[in-house]
Amino acid sequence: MSFGISRIQLEEGTSTREAFGEALAQAGSNPNVVVLDGDVNNSTFTKNFKDEYPDRFFNVGIAESNLVGVAAGLAGCGKLPVVSSFSVFLLCNAYDQIRMSVAFPNQNVKLVGTHAGISIGEDGPSQMTVEDVALACSFPGFTVIVPADGPSASAATHAMLEREGPTFLRCGRPKVPNVYENGDAFHVGKANTVRDGDDVTIVANGIMVAMALDAAEGLSGESISARVVDMHTVKPIDTSALEKAANETKGVVVAEEHMAYGGLGATVAMTLAERGPTRMAFVNIGDTYATSGKPDELLLQFGLTPDAIMDAARRVLKD
Amino acid sequence: MPKARTEDAAELERITRTLRRDIVIATSAAASGHPSTSLSMVEVVSILFFGGVLRYDPKDPHNRERDRFILSKGHGAPGLYAVLAEAGYFPADDLTTLRRLGSPLEGHPNMCRLPGVEASTGSLGQGLSVGIGHALGASIDELDYRVYVMVGDGESEQGQIWEAAMYAGNHSLDNLTLIIDRNGYQQTDSVKNIQSLDPLDKKLEAFGWAVRDIDGHSLDEVRAAFEWAQSITGSPQAIIANTVKGKGVSLLESDPAKWHGKPVPEEDKDRALEEIGA
Ligand SMILES: Cc1ncc(C[n+]2csc(CCOP(=O)(O)OP(=O)(O)O)c2C)c(N)n1
Ligand SMILES: [Mg+2]
């Protein structure tokens, strides 16, 4: 796995949306699983499930509010509904339906948002969500998962179906390099240290994990030893992994494909602030929407690169 | 008050061919985008911009008295950009910057970056409400501009479309015209298979709209429909434009569900341009 230190290649591996779609089709052997779509099943890969279990698949059309409400009703009948659309349409179009019909009554609905972040590329900002992690975390009681690669997206899909309770799983459009050989290491709520180090800790999720590993490699050339923590579960966050990082290294960098507010960075900062002062720096797209462009061009333009993570690590270590 | 442009039949025919060519070339150059979505709307936007309907001035795009055209089905951006270039908002050479980093011709229309774009769209279902806002603005400011909004038939599954339709009907917004690009398909299947809109005309009438059903590829019928719309007082007007998704390119017409959001492959491009005849 390698992005190259400054450029980002998104041509290897599986996309997290595709891994989710494959895992969902496998999970269809559980007759309780029902899948709901808003006319995008060929983009979200819920088409795999549809082809195998057409009787338990519902395309309600381009109507996300209705989509979420129907899923809540199916959960009320004891079914295990998985709702999938582009992350932006699901969370932004149906925010109140998620709040009122899923989160507040604590219904066992699984929401899977694909095409998250800016790495969708050419379709542009109207189809990108830079704010979805913040929105998902804002629902009391929600579990929020941002997998780093195909194997973890697959494991996360199975894991969320096995657990009770409303969950948001965030998937991306492009291929991402594999960080893991398989999903064995994936446990909801438990961060993975994917590289050890004792100078600085990089906490990342989604496609930023692979970039963090590249950054750590680059930093080792400057005799900086960087630990990389895959914080795939933003909520509930793994407090002990964060405390350990703050105690054992001199500072923490948080990298995410999201805007500055309300996502992983904010959650990590809030958690560490309780413990005491920690040097921190943040890599995210800031307070803006993106534009159209190729995925790797956009990641570069909006500061989501191994270089940006290395800069942040140097800032944290400067006294 | 900006003026409408009125071209003769031969020039309108030429314009429709040019727009179709521009749509195919720009999306193929970008290797992504929605040509079939854009091709079904060509006759409607050609009459709007060049058949004596919209009053606009590309040199003064924010003129308060201009008529508004809002493309609610924002993924039809290549069609909107082609007509804006033909109208003179920006050079036609820029069309092939579609979806490139730095270009204001984003994958979906962004009103902050491109003059002539009246609303940022791309999340389906929202343009009609924005159109109502513009229509109300005209009455507050006592201006006599008109507002035209185009939605897709799949897009018409969104609840917000019907919230807006109810409001416009109840409040007799007669400076508002809705065009439904009824090409029969959405992203993954036909509209009929997913969520039939029938009877669309009766539904809109029940919501207080004057409704007309036309062949959306007949320049004469489209022109007559806009003349009819302008003559209606006391209610908003809906033009149901029956169209073909991918119109003019047989490959895209052949399997609309398969070709949604896909450019004409490089090896089929010459044949497509030949069929268009531009
Ligand atoms: C709220 C929302 N949900 C889903 C999508 C994804 N999407 C883009 S185009 C499309 C199909 C649109 O069909 P229609 O309105 O009939 O337009 P056509 O391409 O046929 O002109 C879908 C589902 C979207 N853009 N917005
Ligand atoms: Mg359609």
Image (cartoon, coloured by chain):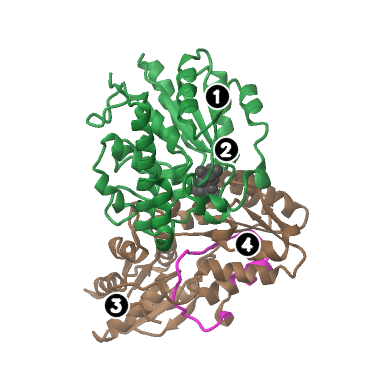
Chain colours: A brown, B green
**Residue A16 picture location, percent across and down:** 51, 69
Question: Residue B98 or B132: which is nearer the viewer?
Answer: B98
Q: CA distance from mark 1 to mark 4?
A: 37 Å
- Chain of the residue displaying label 1: B
Give the vertical position of B116 relative to A253 (above or below). Answer: above
Nearer the N terminus, badge 1 or badge 2?
A: 2
Q: CA distance from mark 2 to mark 4?
A: 23 Å
- Chain of the residue displaying label 3: A
Q: Are marks 1 and 2 in contact (CB under 8 Å)?
A: no
Q: Amino acid type of disc 1?
A: Tyr
Q: CA distance from mark 4 to mark 3?
A: 36 Å
Quadrant in which residue A44 is drawn: bottom right
Circle 1 or circle 2, nearest the eye: 2
Pointer 4 local density, CA inside 10 Å: few below 14, some 14–19, many at least 20: many
Question: Do badges 2 and 4 share one subunit?
Answer: no
Q: CA distance from mark 1 to mark 2?
A: 15 Å
Point 35% across, 47% down: residue: B22
Instruction: Provide the residue designation for mark 3.
Output: A5
Q: For residue B167, which numbered disc appears in the image?
A: 1
**Label 2 residue near ligand 1, CB within 8 Å:** yes
Q: Secondary structure at mark 3?
A: loop
Q: Amino acid type of disc 2?
A: Ser
Q: Secondary structure at mark 1?
A: helix
Q: Amino acid type of disc 3?
A: Ile
Circle 4 or circle 3, nearest the eye: 4
